[in-house]
Image (cartoon, rainbow, N blue to C red):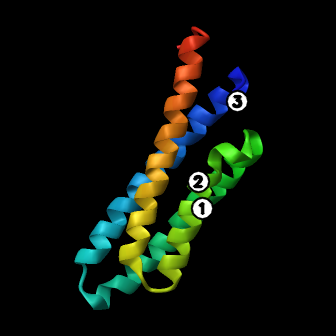
Amino acid sequence: MQTKEAIIAYAQSEKAKAGLLMASQLLEIYHGLPDHDRHGAERFLRPLLGMISSEIHLSKKMTSPEVWAAVDKSLNTALVMMNSGVLSEASYHIVQAISGVTTIGQRSMEHLIREKLL
């Protein structure tokens, strides 16, 4: 990983992680809502996941795409599960995406520490 790529990956991973954590919390809230209130929550959650997905695609263009492949796959699977009405499965894939983004951030930070930039 090059230094420029590490800086960009670290910044993008932090943004993506924040969004994914919010989405994860919203999914937990969603599960506790009565059925008649869930439609409103879905209308908020879908665009949020779409924005996070856009950030992941931007990250793939700005850095090595293979670095983000697992995160992209997890997020896409979560969107498919959500669109299929299986939101409990979407939660699992959001957590997988959080783990992947955290790993990207950690590896980027380690590179920057080795280069004595952090």
Q: Position of residue 45 (x, y in %)?
A: 46, 70
Residue found at the very far top of the displayed protein: 116
Residue type at mark 2 is Ala
Secondary structure at badge 2 equals helix
Mark carried by residue 5: 3
Q: How many marks?
A: 3
Q: State if disc 2 and disc 1 touch (CB < 8 Å).
A: yes
The earlier-in-sequence mark between 3 and 1 is 3
Quadrant of res 34? bottom left
Task: Identify whether 15 is placed above or below 53.
Answer: above
Q: Name which residue type carries label 3.
A: Glu
Of residues 84 and 28, which is closer to you in this image?
Answer: 84
Front position among marks 3 and 1: 1
Nearest to N terminus: mark 3 or mark 2: 3
Q: Distance between the residues labelled 1 and 2?
A: 5 Å
Horizontal and vertical percent position of residue 110: 53, 22
At a point 45% along the width and 56% down the height, the residue shown is: 96
Residue type, numbered disc 1 = Lys
